[in-house]
Structures are given as C-alpha cells and as structure tokens.
C-alpha cells in the first residue's frame, strides 16, 4: 500500500496525467532485507525493473552491483557510481560492438546461452568471464519466462567448454525461475541443474566458480508472498544440498522485489460505459493502459491492487481498459476486476505495487500520450 510519504506527496502535487511515485525508503528497506536474507550472495539489481537515477544512486551507495541488459544500462550504472566490477552484462543477446563497448568500460562479466555468443565475446572481450544460462520450467511463477533465454544443461557444458578453449574464463552458470515466483522449491530444481553442469565440467578439468540465481523474487500484489528470509533459507538449504561444503560464489538479481512495492500510480477514470442496454457489465476506462506503463497486465498475468475513494461501497466486477485507440489496450477482461458501483468519471484511483516495469514499458508517444511521469521521493 502507499506509504504516508507517498500520500503526503500526492496531497500536495498535481499532475495533468497519470504519474508514478516511488518511495526510496521502501527501496532501501527491501535491499537491506535481501542483504540479511542472503548474506553470502552479492546483489545485482536488475536495472530494467526501474532505472530511475535516484534509485540507482541509492542502491550504489548501499553497495549494490547491477545487472545490465544493454550498453545504455551499463552507462546508467557507471553514472550512479558503480565500478565496472560491479556490473554484469546479463543479456544473452548482444551485438558484438556493444560487447566491445562494455569491455572498453571495464565490464568483464557476460551472460551467454550458445556457442555463437561465446565466439562474439572471445573476439572483442578477450579473457572475459562468462556464465551460461540454463533453461528452467518456470513452474510456480505468475509470469513464467519463455524459452527465449537459456539452453539445456547438456548444452551449457559444451558452451562453457568452448569458452574455455577460446581463452575466456568459463566462470559459471545462471538461471531464472520465472517472474513473481512464489514456489520456494523452484530454486532447488534450478540449483540441481546448475550443480550437474558444475560436475560435468569438473570432470573435464574446468572449475566453475559462480552460480547466478537470477531474479524472480516476488513483490506483493493481491496475494501474500513468502518473505525474503523464507527465500534465503530455501536457497541456502538447496545450495548445501547440491554443492555440499563447496558452495560457489553466488549472486542474485532482484528487480521487482526491490522496487515493486515502493511505487504507486495515480490515475483518473476517463469514462464508464456499457455496450448494450441489457448488458450490465461496466467498462471502466483509465488515463493509463498497456501502452502507458501497465504492459504487465498482458494476459492478465499481473493483477495490481487498486484503491478508489469508494472502497467501502458495494463492489461489482468490471472490465478495465486504457485510453488509447487500440483494441488491445484492455487490462482485465478475462477476469473482470471488482470496483465500486459508485465509481464515477473523474475519480482518481491509486494502483499499488507499480514501482517495477511501468515507466520502462511506457511508449514514447503512442496516440500522442506522453510517457508516464515519475517522481522519486
């Protein structure tokens, strides 16, 4: 829910359109909770979740490292005060010239999932450390990731063997258990695969050093989620189970779990209508939609908590949609969202848990709507 600092800000600041407000105190608390829960793991904040300079500066000052998906994100991390050693180029799909630029900046840690990517890195980033991403099933995640990233464990062995032969440091294995992962055992299954890769390469004389356990740690939306401490205990138990007394260097890449519950979007009801006289289903249109920052409502994967001025009144399910002239700009239709019957045009509502993956998903000017405004307090 919105913190008092956010509510005080909203009471004194007006915006012509929808806006996101992020409370840095919550960001700080979330980061420190992960430090306590997984004290042996380095935190690489996933910049893509929310790259606001104020957030990056805060996390850098707390000692965070950074997971970057592009050269632009690498530059953001450097500008925020991170040293190159605290940056991982975590995208498995990189242009060769971007690898060269990252290497020139001093970045030496790169993600791969195929031999072709290894060959690019070997050409322009000699001696770099590479970790290979392994596919996971994504079971238990509210937003399971596709097969776009990663390879099967057997192929990861070949990829890292080739990296070693080309003069790179075959450094480790990574995985991602799926976004908004609430199944604590998901990390156990992934760590089992990671340990298999370690053992296979050990037999070939190659000693890996790193397990990148990725992100997937959830934030609370409409349902309770396990605590950071619960995840920390589950992960540590699995590390001991699969690696014994030889636990490797580990890193995690939380993004949503660091900033998600730190943000609230204020939006306005633009229109409430029905499609026929005998159709009682309301359509509620907001001044924000899929193209203005709520892209994660795609397939209704993420259901945000919504607060209105009439939440003590009678509720009834409605179809929630955005303002653009695009028929895909519907947020919740398969599972209508309960909102008060007394909701009226012009009402301002708050969408909670929107600190992650909103501003970065907003289009520049689709239909002429400006990007989502953001305030970090």
Image (spheres, rainbow, N blue to C red):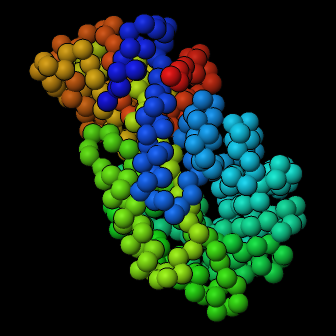
| Res 54 → quadrant | top right
- Could you say where residue 24 lies in the image, as x and y percent from the top left? 49, 30
* Residue 175 vertical placement versus 75 (above, below): below
Residue 361 shows up from this direction = yes
Q: How many marks?
A: 0
Name the residue nearer the viewer: 126 or 286: 126
- Single out the residue that lies furthest toward the left: 314
Q: Is residue 247 left or right of residue 100?
A: left
Residue plotted at (26% across, 44% down)? 223
Q: Is residue 178 above or below residue 296?
A: below
- Judge left or right: residue 19 versus residue 201: left
Residue 199, horizontal then vertical, whole percent = 57, 87
Q: Is residue 169 above or below residue 350?
A: below
Residue 170 is situated, as x and y percent measured from the top left of the image, at 72, 75
Residue nearer the viewer, 243 or 355: 243
User: In screen coordinates, is 313 left or right of 295?
Assistant: left
Q: Residue furthest bottom?
A: 203
Residue at (40, 61) in percent of width and height: 232
Q: Is residue 160 left or right of residue 353?
A: right
Q: Residue at x 51, y 63 (%)?
A: 40
Screen quadrant of the N terminus: top left
| Closer to us: 277 or 26 | 26
Q: Position of residue 245 (x, y in %)?
A: 49, 82
Q: Is residue 290 visible?
A: no
Q: In which image quadrant can residue 234 be found? A: bottom left
**Which residue lies at the image location 81% right of the left edge and 81% below the top edge?**
165
């Amino acid at each position: 829910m919105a913190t008092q600092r956010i509510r005080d800000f909203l009471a004194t600041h007006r915006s012509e359109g929808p806006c996101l407000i992020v409370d840095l105190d919550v960001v700080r608390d979330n980061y420190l909770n992960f430090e306590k829960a997984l004290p042996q793991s380095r935190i690489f904040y996933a910049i893509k979740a929310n790259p606001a300079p104020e957030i990056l500066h805060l996390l850098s000052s707390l000692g965070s490292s950074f997971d970057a998906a592009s050269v632009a994100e690498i530059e953001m991390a450097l500008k925020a005060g991170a040293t190159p050693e605290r940056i991982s180029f975590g995208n498995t799909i990189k242009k060769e010239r971007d690898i060269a630029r990252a290497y020139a900046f001093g970045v030496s840690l790169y993600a791969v999932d195929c031999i072709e990517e290894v060959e690019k890195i070997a050409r322009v980033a000699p001696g770099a450390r590479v970790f290979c991403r392994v596919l996971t099933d994504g079971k238990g995640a509210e937003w399971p990731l596709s097969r776009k990233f990663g390879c099967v464990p057997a192929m990861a062995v070949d990829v890292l063997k080739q990296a070693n032969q080309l003069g790179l440091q075959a450094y480790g294995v990574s995985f991602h258990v799926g976004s908004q992962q609430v199944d604590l055992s998901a990390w156990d299954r992934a760590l089992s695969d990671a340990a298999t890769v370690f053992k296979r390469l050990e037999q070939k004389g190659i000693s890996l050093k790193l397990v990148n356990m990725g992100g997937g740690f959830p934030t609370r939306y409409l349902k309770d989620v396990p605590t950071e401490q619960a995840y920390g205990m589950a992960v540590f138990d699995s590390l001991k189970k699969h690696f014994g007394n030889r636990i490797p260097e580990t890193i995690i890449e939380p993004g949503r779990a660091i900033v998600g519950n730190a943000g609230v979007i204020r939006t306005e009801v633009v229109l409430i209508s029905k499609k026929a006289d005998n159709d009682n289903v309301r359509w509620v249109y907001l001044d924000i939609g899929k193209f203005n920052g709520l892209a994660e409502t795609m397939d209704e994967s993420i259901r945000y908590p919504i607060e209105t001025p009439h939440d003590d009144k009678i509720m009834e399910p409605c179809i929630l949609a955005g303002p653009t002239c695009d028929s895909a700009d519907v947020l919740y239709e398969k599972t209508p969202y309960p909102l008060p019957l007394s909701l009226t045009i012009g009402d301002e509502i708050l969408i909670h848990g929107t600190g992650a993956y909103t501003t970065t998903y907003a289009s520049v000017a689709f239909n002429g709507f400006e990007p989502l405004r953001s305030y970090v307090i």
